[in-house]
Amino acid sequence: MDLQEYFSLVFTDYTLRTITLGTAILGAVCGMLGSFAVLRKQSLLGDAISHAALPGIAIAFLITGAKDSNVLLLGALVSGLIGTFWIRGIISKTHLKSDTALGLILSVFFGFGMLLLTFIQKQPNANQAGLDKYLFGQAATLVESDVWLMALVTGICLIVLLLFWKEFKILLFDADYTKTLGFNTKFIDILITVFIVLAIVLGLQTVGVVLMSAMLLAPAAAARQWTNSLGVMVFLAALFGAFAGVFGTAVSASQNNLSTGPVIVIVAGIFVLISFIFSPSRGLLFKQIRFIKNRRDLQLHKTLAFMYNIAETHEDISHPHAIKILNNFQGYTRNTLQKLVDKNYVFLQGNTWSLTPEGFKTAANLYNQQSINNE
Amino acid sequence: MSSAQIEIQLIASLVAIACAIPGTFLVLRKMAMISDAISHSILPGIVIGFFITQNLNSPLLILLAAVTGIITVILVEYIQKTGLVKEDTAIGLVFPALFSIGVILIAKNANDVHLDVDAVLLGELAFAPFDRLLLFGTDVGPKSLWIIGVILIITIGLLFAFFKELKVSTFDAGLASALGFSPVIMHYGLMSVASVTTVSAFDAVGAILVVALMIAPAATAYLLTTDLKKMLGYAISFGVFSAISGYWVAHWLDASIAGSITTMLGLLFFLVYLFAPNKGLIAVIYRERRQRIEVSLLTFLLHLGNHQEIEERHVNHLSEHINWHKVRSKTVLDLALKNNMVTIDKNIVSLTEKGKDFTKQAIDYIITNEDSQIEHMKEDFFLFRG
């Protein structure tokens, strides 16, 4: 199946439609909540939570003995929340730093989850096969009810986001101020954290424990480059996430042996790369161009100032000088000279140059302007 | 115990030691998450190395994977330097991308060879003794034992050779560069050791356990001591203890050895987290409560000092006046009595000479806010000790 075929089939084929819708919704909700995670400097929390959810899945299975994905997700949610609050406990009550707490909880919970999973595998229960799909995710196992659940959670999340928009925003940028205004910061904080955990847990089935953090971060990191407004950023991140989901599914469906999770992550990674390079205000490309342009301007000014210093010593400002004397000066190149001529600052005649009255005036004002600015 | 069992425990212990040493420095340098990133992003290096050599134990594979680890560190630092995103976001972006490339490479090319992601991530220590190293036709032991042994010897050698430098550059990068050894070289040296250790340990114990063995023992040790040498020692012993006890738990449950060692590490950390003498949760909560009461006591004494009127100093009035609940006022009053700072005469509380003295000094301390003043106060007035 190639890409074209995929897009013609996506509206008619049940499996493709379900998976595409599922990954798109997942991408959108992750992008939305991921924006908050990125701005709160909790980017790696997603990684830790997704790993910490694993023992919950195993324990939920051990208790119920059934592979109902809703029950398993509930287990994942509980264990993810325990992990999150333990991380906070470690950071606030001991002198261990956040990176240590994250890495510790991540690896310990994941290891415990693996212990339970291997323990389950040895149990005489035919039902246990397929639990390891939560490790790397399998979008192909999505069914319509999963997609409905995702849509429901996304809807609730959207409503809560709109209801508490002001509170979330102010907490994000100035937590102390929020507290003095009398908001219950603890409640808002817990609310947003719970939703982040919820989004991660939802994604486990599709992209898996290991890659979930990228799902949360990449759309938000890409969106951050295009705007300085929180609302626009959340919207863009949701859009990027949804597109990454759809494209990733399309690419992985059109090739053999490609699991969806990694492809979605790669697509999202490409979005980030493009944003890093081509974003107009923050992007590396335009930053470099601006840098080069500024340097050129500076060189031009330096040359002009040098010429001005020479011309100043003569009574007649347009007294011609040999081009050769400019050679000793660092900022001088044939190009800068040509540019000065183009701007009508300098008049060339054979091997000599002279400042035009306009050029003399500009050069005289070069440093005045600066000193005015400095005042 | 069969010889295979002994060998497994030996490998696990050696891995634990080899991980604990760089792990301690990573935790102290606040770079613990880098080890997680490295452990994931070495995957493409391993896959490419495997395609070239077709052998999971070849030195070239370890080298390539270690190079990928260092590339991860460089990429993270580059992205961070552009200022577009913060460091943690940079880490969170780089390693899933590299890991995804590895997974896709495996999926596209390695269908017919034995290399799957589970094995890389989780490892299987139980199979380690079956992969023997034959030297001149004689069996000299499991391959992973030799690999990790060599890495461990190199790590220990580097640790002894550069201990001073590592110590200074960890705690004071500025001083280190002033003294003439570049923190950058130290940084990349440490990163290289961490990468090589991760790679050499991964196929025995899996990438996740490597992370756990690096971070958990060091974090546990950090709660118990602030001395670098002691911390290294504690971390190593915690690692080895978990490795051996974890093996037996796994043996008993018939489950993954790596998972069970990690669980032991987690349990150990949990116990220390709760009960560590000065920095454990219980100690911290106790201290916070004590400090709260001390502050309350001070407020109470100040109130007494400011009021000569009898009605202001009546026991029943106090709880209303300073807005305290009954229990709290009673605790504070008892404490003040025990320390001979107040006397109660017909339910009227009055300050003693000692109490007046204490209040005066406390006010001095609050006004000047110099730590040196509170030090001798602690000696003069035994609040909780006397």
Image: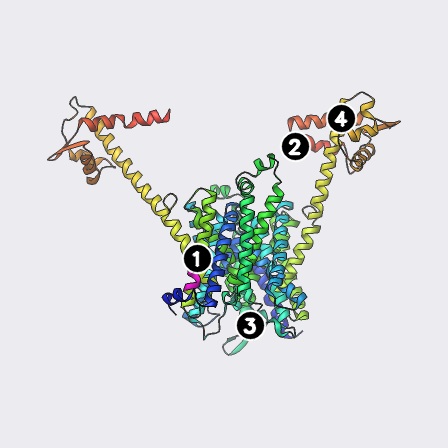
| Residue A245 is covered by the magenta coloring | yes
Q: Which residue does the image show at 78% across and 25% down from the upper left?
A: B304
> Could you tell whether B50 is left or right of B123 in the image?
left
Q: Which residue does the image show at 44% across and 63% down from the upper left?
A: A249
Q: Considering the image in quadrants, where does the N terminus of chain B appear?
A: bottom right
Residue B375: in sight, yes or no?
yes
* Marks 4 and 2 belong to one chain: yes
Q: Which one is closest to the eye, mark 4 or mark 2?
A: 4
Query: At which x and y percent is residue B184?
Result: 45, 48
Span highlighted in magenta in the image: A244-250
Residue indicated by mark 3: B142
Residue indicated by mark 2: B371
| Residue B328 is covered by the magenta coloring | no
Q: Which one is closest to the eye, mark 1 or mark 3?
A: 1
Residue indicated by mark 4: B303
Q: Which residue does the image show at 46% across and 48% down from the upper left?
A: A235
Tell which subunit mark 4 falls on.
B
Lower position in the chain sequence, tag 4 or tag 2: 4
Name the secondary structure under disc 4.
helix
Query: At which x and y percent is residue B274?
Result: 70, 51
- Separation of marks 2 and 1 at Cα, in angstroms: 56 Å
